[in-house]
Amino acid sequence: MRPNSPPVMALLLTALVAAGCAQAPVQKDGITINDPFEAQNRRVHAFNKGLDARVIGPVANRLKGSDDDAPRDPDAPIGLLQMVINAGRNLSLPVKVVNGLLQGKRRDAGANLTRFAVNSTVGLGGVFDPAADSFGVTERDTDFGQTLAVWGVPEGAYLELPVLGPSTQRDAVGQVVDLLIDPLYHVFDGRDAATVFALRVASKAGDRARFGDTVDGILQGSADSYAQTRLIWLMNRRFDLGETGDDYDPYDDADVIDPYSD
Amino acid sequence: MTITTPMTMRMSSTPIRTDRRGLLGLIGCASLTAVLPWRPAHALDADGAHALIDRSLAEVYQVINSGQPAPQMYQQFEAIFARYADVDVIARSALGPAARQTDPATFAEYRQAFQGYIGRKYGARFREFIGSRIEVTGSRQLKSFYAVTSVAYLNGRAPLEVEWHVSDRSGQDLYFNIIIEGVNMLASERAEIGAMLARRQGDVAALAADLRQAG
């Protein structure tokens, strides 16, 4: 990427995102919600919810088996499920290194690069996690959506994407760009690239299996699962990106939910 | 049942709320104080808020690691929640403006159902914390209340930041909000209870009945 491309791209995307803001964002439940495509999003949500109930959930439950209910001994060997999650996550590290560099966060990029080097070799292709277990180097999760946020591109409207779930205009662009700038897809092609992709999808499915009860609770147990998913996802995403300051700043008195003053 | 000296002291420091809740609230407060293990005669400070969360977490972990069947666990989580959280103000805030138009008897019914719902709903999440630990890392003042920060270390997953908001505005040191990785419990319950109430066309008694089945 040329050094002058970030500002150009940022400008372009800002224009793109601004075009989606036909309706003014509203203040709801303590956060700003910008959802001009709500009707369309709700249709996609209904589809995703059905998919989760009929396909993803049952598969995830089968993956998980029954062994996960018992308290886990931290020293016990990890199961097949955790191995798949580890291997998939390991393959997601190169693109996180790239994003760390694009954001100017060299330490984060370095930590992810170290993890990839150690776990791919000593960790037998990322199946095990000696980088964290022995050296205390944990993953610095990031993506191109965050890179865009660092470059100053606004969040844009909330979107629920088919299969992929909650996103925003900025993050949706990020998800596409992440596929394009992933070094692994430039190193591998054909069947190898397909294997890499399949492992990463399996890893996501594994995560879904491990934390499936929480997902089920929100998706199937909520009175308005669309609004609940949107609220929880936006709060968590803004927290991860350090963007809570824009609308919900716990240090800013006016926006703190203080039930005693109601 | 006698109203203890520290109780009267705290009542005099929060005249507005006492007036609003009336005699019933007074009796409730007095009986709670008699049951509660701690009696802070002083105003809440950062250390007090820190200590409250430490105690609350110790009890939660005792339950998590007890290996009991889920329904028993949920009952105990509910009891811990009722002891350490300001259930009244959380329930009131979750109900939103409708709380003001609800008569005390219906509200009490809703509040009780809400408490059980929280015990089951968050109890189910706590079960994911089996084999984990939470470290309380700090405490600071935020306007009229205190924020206690902690980090949850879970198996095979990045550590979670958990923040607790503690206040003595009820007359006791209690927490009224939990924020896990930016996800605010009060905000998400406001949305959830709001949606449940809308489904019942604003009927709080029907909402209370639904809450007994939910979570």
Image (cartoon, coloured by chain):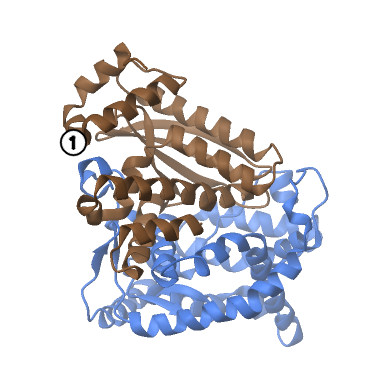
Chain colours: A blue, B brown
Q: Give how far across and how far down residue A261 sits, in percent.
A: 20, 42
Quadrant (top left/top right/bottom left/bottom right) for the N terminus of chain B: top left
Whether A176 is drawn above or below A261: the answer is below
The quadrant holding residue B73 is: top right
* Image quadrant where residue B23 sits: top left
Disc 1: host chain: B
Position above or below: A260 against A157: above
Outermost top residue: B5
A182, A20: nearer the viewer: A20
Q: Position of residue A245 (x, y in %)?
A: 30, 53
Residue A12, percent across and down? 32, 80
Q: Is residue B96 left or right of residue A45?
A: left
Indicate whether A148 appears above or below A136: below
Front position in the image: B46 or B202: B202
Q: Which residue appears at 38% of the width and 72% of the height?
A: A6
Say which element carries label 1: helix
